Amino acid sequence: MSNHGNCTVEGCTRPANYKQEMICQMHYFRRMRNGHFGLKQSKYQRLGYHEHSNGYRVLIIPGHPLSSSRGEVYEHRSVVFKRHGWGLPPCEICGAESDWNTRKTHIDHIDEDRANNRPENLRVLCNYCNVSRTKKSHHSYSHCQSITVNGKTMTPTEWARQPNVNVHAATIRHRIKSGYSPYDALYAAKITHNGNARK
C-alpha cells in the first residue's frame, strides 16, 4: 500500500492507500463489510421503524414536525398530527385545552392496545384524564367495603355523597353491620337516639 493521491470516492479527501482502486483505507474496509462504500443501515433504518420497550411503535421520519433530534416520532402521535396538524382538539373527557406538549396532552389508545394506531382508536386527552382513567374504583380495593344497589357499586363514603342519600357513611356502615339490606342501609329513614324516626 502506498499513497498515490486522494481517494476517488465522491466527497472523500483522504489519501488513496490502495493504488489499484484509488480508494482510502476507510472506504476499502467499508466495501469489504457492506459490499459498497456507504454506511451500513441498521435494521431500524431499513424498516423505517422500531418497537420501543414500552410497547409503542417509533417511526424513523427525519424532518417530521414532531420528530426528535434522532428523527424519531411515535406512530400514534404522527397519525393524530396528520389528522389535526398543530390544532389539536380539546380533551375528549373534560374539554381542557390541548397542545403537543407531552406534559399537558396525551394521545390515548382507546382499546389500550399500544400497537393499534388506527385513527379511530386514538383520542386526545389531557394529562389528568389520561392518568385517572386507568385508576381502579375505590370499591375494588380489598380493604374498602363495597355496597351494590340497583346495579351500582360504591363505597359507603361514595354513597353518602349521592344527593338522594341522607345518611352519613358511618351510619351506612353501622346499618350494614346491623343486618340492614344494602338498599335500606342507604335509604331507610334516619332514627334518632331515642329510637323514633327523625322528622
Image: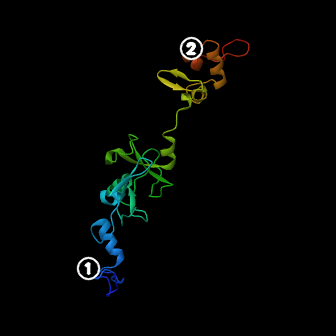
Instruction: Pick whichever of labels 1 and 2 is earlier in the sequence.
Output: 1
Read off the residue under disc 1.
21
As drawn, is 163 to the left or to the right of 82? right
Q: Position of residue 151 (x, y in %)?
A: 46, 22
Percent x, y for residue 74?
39, 55
Q: Which scheme is used to colour this image of the protein? A: rainbow
In the image, residue 21 sits, relative to residue 141, either above or below, namely: below
Q: 22 left or right of 96? A: left
Circle 1/circle 2 CB separation < 8 Å: no
- SS assignment at label 2: loop
Q: Is residue 169 above or below residue 123?
A: above
Characterize the local packing of mark 1: few (<14), some (14-19) or many (20 or more) Cα atoms within 10 angstroms: few
Q: Is residue 87 visible?
A: no
Residue at 67 percent across and 16 percent down: it is 191
Residue 41 image-quadrant placement? bottom left
* Residue type pointed to by label 1: Glu
Residue 187 x %, y %: 57, 19
User: Under tag 1, what secondary structure?
Assistant: loop
Residue 181: mark: 2
Residue 26 pos. (x, y %): 36, 75
Front position among marks 1 and 2: 1
- Indicate which disc residue 143 carries: none
Distance (Cα) linking label 1 and label 2: 94 Å
Residue drawn where x is 33% and y is 68% of the image: 39
Is any part of residue 185 visible from this angle? yes
